Amino acid sequence: MINLKYTNQKLLILDQTLLPNEEKWVEIKNKEDAYEAIKKLMVRGAPAIGIFAGYCMAIFSKDNDIHELKKYLDSARPTAVNLSWATKRIVNAFENGKNLIDEAVAIQNEDIEMCRKISEFGLSLLKDGNGILTHCNAGELAASRYGTGLGPIILGKEKGYNFKVFCDETRPLLQGARLTSYELEKAGVDVTLICDNMAGYAMKNGLIDAVLVGCDRVAANGDVANKIGTSSAAVLAKYYNIPFYVLGPYSTVDFTCKSGDDIVIEERNSDEIKEMYFEKPTALKQTRCLNPSFDVTDNSLITAIITDKGIIRPPYNINLKEKLND
Ligand code: MRU
Protein backbone atom coordinates (compact mmCIF):
# COMPACT_ATOMS: atom_id res chain seq x y z
CA MET A 1 0.00 0.00 0.00
CA ILE A 2 1.18 3.52 -0.62
CA ASN A 3 0.15 4.83 2.81
CA LEU A 4 1.24 2.03 5.20
CA LYS A 5 3.92 -0.67 5.46
CA TYR A 6 4.27 -3.49 7.94
CA THR A 7 7.63 -5.19 7.49
CA ASN A 8 10.02 -6.89 9.93
CA GLN A 9 7.51 -6.22 12.72
CA LYS A 10 7.74 -2.48 12.11
CA LEU A 11 4.70 -0.35 11.27
CA LEU A 12 5.40 2.67 9.07
CA ILE A 13 3.01 5.26 7.67
CA LEU A 14 3.42 7.90 5.01
CA ASP A 15 2.83 11.19 6.85
CA GLN A 16 -0.03 12.65 4.79
CA THR A 17 0.16 16.04 6.51
CA LEU A 18 3.42 16.70 4.63
CA LEU A 19 2.13 15.83 1.16
CA PRO A 20 2.59 16.82 -1.61
CA ASN A 21 5.84 18.55 -0.67
CA GLU A 22 7.53 15.75 1.24
CA GLU A 23 7.14 11.97 1.20
CA LYS A 24 8.22 10.98 4.70
CA TRP A 25 7.68 7.56 6.29
CA VAL A 26 7.22 7.58 10.06
CA GLU A 27 7.51 4.58 12.38
CA ILE A 28 4.62 4.03 14.82
CA LYS A 29 6.24 2.68 17.99
CA ASN A 30 3.51 2.73 20.61
CA LYS A 31 -0.17 3.46 21.23
CA GLU A 32 0.46 7.17 21.77
CA ASP A 33 2.11 7.45 18.34
CA ALA A 34 -0.86 5.59 16.89
CA TYR A 35 -3.41 7.91 18.53
CA GLU A 36 -1.52 11.00 17.40
CA ALA A 37 -1.16 9.72 13.82
CA ILE A 38 -4.95 9.33 13.55
CA LYS A 39 -5.80 12.55 15.42
CA LYS A 40 -3.38 14.70 13.38
CA LEU A 41 -4.46 13.10 10.07
CA MET A 42 -0.99 11.71 9.34
CA VAL A 43 -3.05 8.69 8.36
CA ARG A 44 -6.57 9.60 7.25
CA GLY A 45 -9.49 8.58 5.08
CA ALA A 46 -12.05 6.23 6.58
CA PRO A 47 -10.84 2.82 5.28
CA ALA A 48 -7.15 3.69 5.78
CA ILE A 49 -7.78 4.62 9.42
CA GLY A 50 -9.46 1.23 9.90
CA ILE A 51 -6.59 -0.70 8.30
CA PHE A 52 -4.03 1.24 10.33
CA ALA A 53 -5.96 0.76 13.58
CA GLY A 54 -6.15 -2.98 12.86
CA TYR A 55 -2.35 -3.21 12.78
CA CYS A 56 -1.99 -0.96 15.85
CA MET A 57 -4.42 -3.14 17.84
CA ALA A 58 -2.57 -6.30 16.78
CA ILE A 59 0.87 -4.92 17.66
CA PHE A 60 0.22 -2.84 20.79
CA SER A 61 -2.23 -5.20 22.49
CA LYS A 62 0.87 -7.19 23.48
CA ASP A 63 1.65 -4.44 26.04
CA ASN A 64 -1.84 -3.04 26.66
CA ASP A 65 -5.26 -4.27 27.71
CA ILE A 66 -6.99 -4.82 24.36
CA HIS A 67 -10.34 -3.36 25.45
CA GLU A 68 -8.71 -0.22 26.84
CA LEU A 69 -6.62 0.07 23.69
CA LYS A 70 -9.74 -0.13 21.54
CA LYS A 71 -11.44 2.65 23.52
CA TYR A 72 -8.33 4.81 23.33
CA LEU A 73 -7.85 4.47 19.56
CA ASP A 74 -11.59 4.80 18.80
CA SER A 75 -11.63 8.14 20.64
CA ALA A 76 -9.06 9.66 18.26
CA ARG A 77 -11.69 10.30 15.55
CA PRO A 78 -15.36 9.57 16.15
CA THR A 79 -17.11 10.00 12.78
CA ALA A 80 -15.65 7.40 10.41
CA VAL A 81 -17.17 4.06 11.41
CA ASN A 82 -14.30 2.06 9.89
CA LEU A 83 -12.10 2.84 12.90
CA SER A 84 -14.32 1.23 15.55
CA TRP A 85 -15.36 -1.48 13.07
CA ALA A 86 -11.72 -2.56 12.57
CA THR A 87 -10.75 -2.36 16.25
CA LYS A 88 -13.82 -4.49 17.08
CA ARG A 89 -12.72 -7.09 14.54
CA ILE A 90 -9.34 -7.38 16.24
CA VAL A 91 -11.00 -7.70 19.67
CA ASN A 92 -13.23 -10.48 18.29
CA ALA A 93 -10.19 -12.22 16.79
CA PHE A 94 -8.44 -11.98 20.18
CA GLU A 95 -11.45 -13.49 21.95
CA ASN A 96 -11.51 -16.33 19.42
CA GLY A 97 -7.78 -17.06 19.89
CA LYS A 98 -6.84 -16.00 16.34
CA ASN A 99 -3.50 -14.54 15.26
CA LEU A 100 -4.04 -10.78 15.41
CA ILE A 101 -1.54 -9.79 12.75
CA ASP A 102 -3.20 -12.25 10.36
CA GLU A 103 -6.52 -10.54 11.12
CA ALA A 104 -5.02 -7.08 10.44
CA VAL A 105 -3.61 -8.35 7.13
CA ALA A 106 -7.04 -9.82 6.32
CA ILE A 107 -8.72 -6.43 6.94
CA GLN A 108 -6.21 -4.82 4.57
CA ASN A 109 -6.57 -7.47 1.85
CA GLU A 110 -10.35 -7.39 2.07
CA ASP A 111 -10.25 -3.62 1.63
CA ILE A 112 -8.21 -3.99 -1.56
CA GLU A 113 -10.78 -6.46 -2.86
CA MET A 114 -13.73 -4.25 -1.84
CA CYS A 115 -12.20 -1.14 -3.42
CA ARG A 116 -11.72 -3.05 -6.67
CA LYS A 117 -15.40 -4.08 -6.69
CA ILE A 118 -16.57 -0.56 -5.77
CA SER A 119 -14.42 0.80 -8.61
CA GLU A 120 -15.94 -1.64 -11.12
CA PHE A 121 -19.52 -0.85 -10.08
CA GLY A 122 -18.72 2.88 -10.17
CA LEU A 123 -17.07 2.68 -13.57
CA SER A 124 -20.17 1.01 -15.01
CA LEU A 125 -22.05 4.30 -14.40
CA LEU A 126 -19.54 6.49 -16.25
CA LYS A 127 -18.70 7.17 -19.89
CA ASP A 128 -15.33 7.83 -21.47
CA GLY A 129 -14.60 11.56 -21.49
CA ASN A 130 -16.92 12.36 -18.56
CA GLY A 131 -16.18 15.39 -16.40
CA ILE A 132 -16.14 14.35 -12.74
CA LEU A 133 -16.20 16.45 -9.59
CA THR A 134 -14.72 15.03 -6.40
CA HIS A 135 -14.33 16.42 -2.89
CA CYS A 136 -11.69 15.65 -0.25
CA ASN A 137 -9.57 12.55 -0.93
CA ALA A 138 -11.06 9.12 -1.38
CA GLY A 139 -8.23 7.51 -3.32
CA GLU A 140 -5.47 5.07 -2.56
CA LEU A 141 -4.11 7.30 0.23
CA ALA A 142 -7.49 7.15 2.01
CA ALA A 143 -8.05 3.43 1.59
CA SER A 144 -6.01 0.73 -0.11
CA ARG A 145 -5.53 0.03 -3.81
CA TYR A 146 -7.82 2.18 -6.08
CA GLY A 147 -9.65 3.88 -3.20
CA THR A 148 -13.41 4.43 -3.12
CA GLY A 149 -14.54 7.77 -4.57
CA LEU A 150 -11.51 7.89 -6.89
CA GLY A 151 -11.59 4.15 -7.59
CA PRO A 152 -13.62 4.29 -10.84
CA ILE A 153 -11.32 7.03 -12.13
CA ILE A 154 -8.12 5.07 -11.41
CA LEU A 155 -9.56 1.80 -12.70
CA GLY A 156 -10.93 3.65 -15.73
CA LYS A 157 -7.48 5.06 -16.44
CA GLU A 158 -6.06 1.51 -16.39
CA LYS A 159 -8.72 0.47 -18.90
CA GLY A 160 -8.04 3.39 -21.23
CA TYR A 161 -10.84 5.79 -20.22
CA ASN A 162 -10.01 9.49 -20.19
CA PHE A 163 -11.91 11.40 -17.57
CA LYS A 164 -11.58 15.09 -16.82
CA VAL A 165 -11.50 15.38 -13.06
CA PHE A 166 -12.17 18.56 -11.11
CA CYS A 167 -11.13 18.35 -7.50
CA ASP A 168 -12.34 20.73 -4.82
CA GLU A 169 -9.38 21.91 -2.78
CA THR A 170 -11.40 20.97 0.35
CA ARG A 171 -11.02 23.59 3.05
CA PRO A 172 -9.67 23.72 5.67
CA LEU A 173 -7.16 20.87 5.48
CA LEU A 174 -6.92 20.83 1.68
CA GLN A 175 -7.09 17.09 1.14
CA GLY A 176 -8.31 17.75 -2.40
CA ALA A 177 -5.42 20.05 -3.28
CA ARG A 178 -2.68 18.28 -1.37
CA LEU A 179 -3.72 14.64 -1.83
CA THR A 180 -6.26 14.12 -4.63
CA SER A 181 -4.50 16.25 -7.24
CA TYR A 182 -1.19 14.62 -6.19
CA GLU A 183 -2.60 11.10 -6.55
CA LEU A 184 -4.32 11.78 -9.85
CA GLU A 185 -1.28 13.53 -11.34
CA LYS A 186 0.80 10.49 -10.39
CA ALA A 187 -1.74 8.20 -12.03
CA GLY A 188 -1.65 10.28 -15.23
CA VAL A 189 -5.29 11.42 -14.90
CA ASP A 190 -6.38 14.79 -16.35
CA VAL A 191 -7.03 16.79 -13.16
CA THR A 192 -7.95 20.42 -12.52
CA LEU A 193 -7.92 21.89 -9.03
CA ILE A 194 -10.74 24.28 -8.10
CA CYS A 195 -11.70 26.12 -4.92
CA ASP A 196 -14.64 24.55 -3.08
CA ASN A 197 -16.88 27.48 -3.98
CA MET A 198 -16.27 27.00 -7.72
CA ALA A 199 -18.26 23.77 -7.91
CA GLY A 200 -21.40 25.67 -8.96
CA TYR A 201 -19.44 27.44 -11.71
CA ALA A 202 -18.09 24.12 -13.02
CA MET A 203 -21.56 22.55 -13.02
CA LYS A 204 -23.33 25.52 -14.62
CA ASN A 205 -20.74 25.56 -17.40
CA GLY A 206 -21.28 21.91 -18.28
CA LEU A 207 -17.91 20.68 -17.04
CA ILE A 208 -19.36 18.06 -14.68
CA ASP A 209 -21.26 14.89 -15.65
CA ALA A 210 -21.09 13.17 -12.26
CA VAL A 211 -19.94 13.76 -8.68
CA LEU A 212 -18.00 10.95 -6.96
CA VAL A 213 -17.22 11.07 -3.25
CA GLY A 214 -16.20 8.60 -0.54
CA CYS A 215 -18.04 8.30 2.78
CA ASP A 216 -17.32 8.10 6.48
CA ARG A 217 -20.58 6.71 7.88
CA VAL A 218 -23.86 5.87 6.15
CA ALA A 219 -27.01 5.80 8.28
CA ALA A 220 -29.78 3.21 7.80
CA ASN A 221 -31.90 5.75 5.88
CA GLY A 222 -29.06 6.59 3.47
CA ASP A 223 -27.97 9.90 5.03
CA VAL A 224 -24.19 10.08 4.64
CA ALA A 225 -21.51 11.72 6.80
CA ASN A 226 -18.69 12.94 4.64
CA LYS A 227 -15.98 15.59 4.57
CA ILE A 228 -17.28 19.07 5.35
CA GLY A 229 -18.48 20.73 2.16
CA THR A 230 -19.71 17.55 0.51
CA SER A 231 -23.35 18.36 1.18
CA SER A 232 -22.95 21.71 -0.64
CA ALA A 233 -21.74 19.85 -3.72
CA ALA A 234 -24.73 17.49 -3.37
CA VAL A 235 -27.22 20.40 -3.27
CA LEU A 236 -25.61 21.92 -6.36
CA ALA A 237 -25.64 18.58 -8.17
CA LYS A 238 -29.37 18.21 -7.48
CA TYR A 239 -30.01 21.74 -8.77
CA TYR A 240 -28.08 21.10 -11.99
CA ASN A 241 -29.49 17.57 -12.38
CA ILE A 242 -26.09 15.89 -12.15
CA PRO A 243 -25.82 12.41 -10.56
CA PHE A 244 -24.26 12.44 -7.11
CA TYR A 245 -22.64 9.10 -6.19
CA VAL A 246 -21.32 8.06 -2.77
CA LEU A 247 -18.82 5.18 -2.80
CA GLY A 248 -17.69 3.08 0.17
CA PRO A 249 -17.33 -0.44 1.53
CA TYR A 250 -20.33 -2.22 3.11
CA SER A 251 -18.65 -1.71 6.52
CA THR A 252 -19.28 2.05 6.24
CA VAL A 253 -23.02 1.50 6.63
CA ASP A 254 -23.97 1.73 10.29
CA PHE A 255 -27.46 0.34 10.87
CA THR A 256 -27.32 1.50 14.51
CA CYS A 257 -27.68 5.07 13.20
CA LYS A 258 -31.26 5.47 12.01
CA SER A 259 -30.52 8.78 10.30
CA GLY A 260 -27.74 11.32 9.95
CA ASP A 261 -28.90 12.96 13.20
CA ASP A 262 -27.43 9.98 15.08
CA ILE A 263 -23.94 10.40 13.59
CA VAL A 264 -21.39 12.04 15.90
CA ILE A 265 -19.58 14.79 14.04
CA GLU A 266 -15.95 15.47 14.90
CA GLU A 267 -15.15 19.09 15.84
CA ARG A 268 -11.60 20.20 15.15
CA ASN A 269 -9.40 23.04 16.31
CA SER A 270 -10.07 26.48 14.83
CA ASP A 271 -6.35 26.94 14.04
CA GLU A 272 -6.96 24.72 11.05
CA ILE A 273 -9.19 27.40 9.50
CA LYS A 274 -7.15 30.48 10.36
CA GLU A 275 -3.55 29.35 10.49
CA MET A 276 -2.56 25.88 9.53
CA TYR A 277 -1.75 26.20 5.83
CA PHE A 278 -1.12 29.96 5.76
CA GLU A 279 2.09 31.92 6.29
CA LYS A 280 0.19 34.44 8.42
CA PRO A 281 -3.12 34.06 10.29
CA THR A 282 -6.08 35.00 8.08
CA ALA A 283 -8.22 36.32 10.93
CA LEU A 284 -7.74 37.86 14.36
CA LYS A 285 -6.73 35.56 17.18
CA GLN A 286 -10.01 36.23 19.02
CA THR A 287 -12.22 35.51 16.00
CA ARG A 288 -14.28 32.45 16.74
CA CYS A 289 -14.33 29.64 14.17
CA LEU A 290 -16.67 26.73 13.72
CA ASN A 291 -14.77 23.72 12.41
CA PRO A 292 -16.84 20.55 12.09
CA SER A 293 -14.77 18.04 10.15
CA PHE A 294 -17.76 16.42 8.44
CA ASP A 295 -21.27 17.22 7.35
CA VAL A 296 -24.25 15.03 6.61
CA THR A 297 -25.66 14.80 3.09
CA ASP A 298 -29.39 14.16 3.09
CA ASN A 299 -30.33 10.90 1.36
CA SER A 300 -32.71 12.79 -0.99
CA LEU A 301 -29.65 14.33 -2.67
CA ILE A 302 -27.88 11.02 -3.32
CA THR A 303 -28.41 9.31 -6.68
CA ALA A 304 -26.84 6.01 -5.58
CA ILE A 305 -24.61 4.52 -2.90
CA ILE A 306 -22.02 2.28 -4.51
CA THR A 307 -20.65 -0.49 -2.28
CA ASP A 308 -18.63 -3.63 -2.91
CA LYS A 309 -21.95 -5.50 -2.79
CA GLY A 310 -23.52 -3.48 -5.58
CA ILE A 311 -25.15 -0.21 -6.56
CA ILE A 312 -27.88 0.78 -4.12
CA ARG A 313 -30.57 3.25 -5.13
CA PRO A 314 -33.43 4.88 -3.17
CA PRO A 315 -35.46 4.13 -1.13
CA TYR A 316 -32.36 3.56 1.00
CA ASN A 317 -34.20 2.60 4.19
CA ILE A 318 -35.39 -0.53 2.32
CA ASN A 319 -32.63 -1.16 -0.22
CA LEU A 320 -29.59 -0.80 2.08
CA LYS A 321 -30.96 -3.49 4.39
CA GLU A 322 -31.97 -5.73 1.51
CA LYS A 323 -28.60 -5.53 -0.23
CA LEU A 324 -26.28 -5.57 2.78
CA ASN A 325 -28.04 -7.83 5.25
CA ASP A 326 -28.42 -10.75 2.88
O1 MRU B 1 -10.67 13.96 7.49
P1 MRU B 1 -10.28 12.95 6.47
O2 MRU B 1 -9.19 13.42 5.57
O3 MRU B 1 -9.99 11.60 7.09
O4 MRU B 1 -11.59 12.78 5.61
C1 MRU B 1 -11.60 11.90 4.56
C2 MRU B 1 -12.85 11.91 3.81
O5 MRU B 1 -13.80 12.62 4.07
C3 MRU B 1 -12.96 10.93 2.77
O6 MRU B 1 -13.58 11.47 1.67
C4 MRU B 1 -13.71 9.76 3.38
O7 MRU B 1 -13.05 9.32 4.54
C5 MRU B 1 -13.83 8.67 2.48
S1 MRU B 1 -12.30 7.90 2.34
C6 MRU B 1 -12.24 6.81 1.15
Image (cartoon, rainbow, N blue to C red):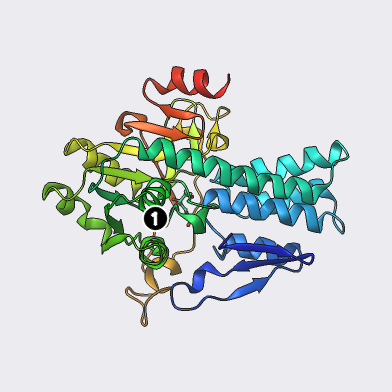
Q: Which residue is mark 1?
A: 136
Q: Nearer the viewer, residue 121 or 64?
A: 121
- Which residue is at a point 32% across and 62% down the rendered structure image? 169
Q: Position of residue 18 (x, y in %)?
A: 50, 74
Horizontal relation, residue 282 to residue 108: left or right: left
Look at the numbered disc 1 and give the secondary structure of its residue: loop
One can see residue 68 in this view: no
Of all residues, the one furthest to the front in this rendering is 160
Horizontal relation, residue 282 to residue 48: left or right: left
On whether ligand 1 comes within 8 Å of the CB at mark 1, the answer is yes
Q: Residues within 10 Å of mark 1 (few under 14, many from 20)?
A: many
Q: Position of residue 98 (x, y in %)?
A: 85, 41
Of all residues, the one furthest to the left in this rendering is 205
- Which residue is at a point 62% across and 55% down the rendered structure image? 76
Quadrant of the image containing the N terminus: bottom right
Q: Position of residue 304 (x, y in %)?
A: 36, 31
- Which residue is at a point 76% across and 44% down the rendered structure image? 90
Vertical side of 7 occupied by 260: above or below:
above
Q: Position of residue 25 (x, y in %)?
A: 61, 73
Vertical side of 278 occupied by 184: above or below:
above
Horizontal relation, residue 321 to residue 247: left or right: right
One can see residue 134 in this view: yes
Q: Amino acid at mark 1?
A: Cys
Callout count: 1
Q: Nearer the viewer, residue 130 or 250?
A: 130
- Which residue is at a point 16% across and 39% down the rendered structure image? 240
Of all residues, the one furthest to the bottom in this rendering is 279
Quadrant of the image containing the C terminus: top right
Horizontal relation, residue 221 to residue 23: left or right: left
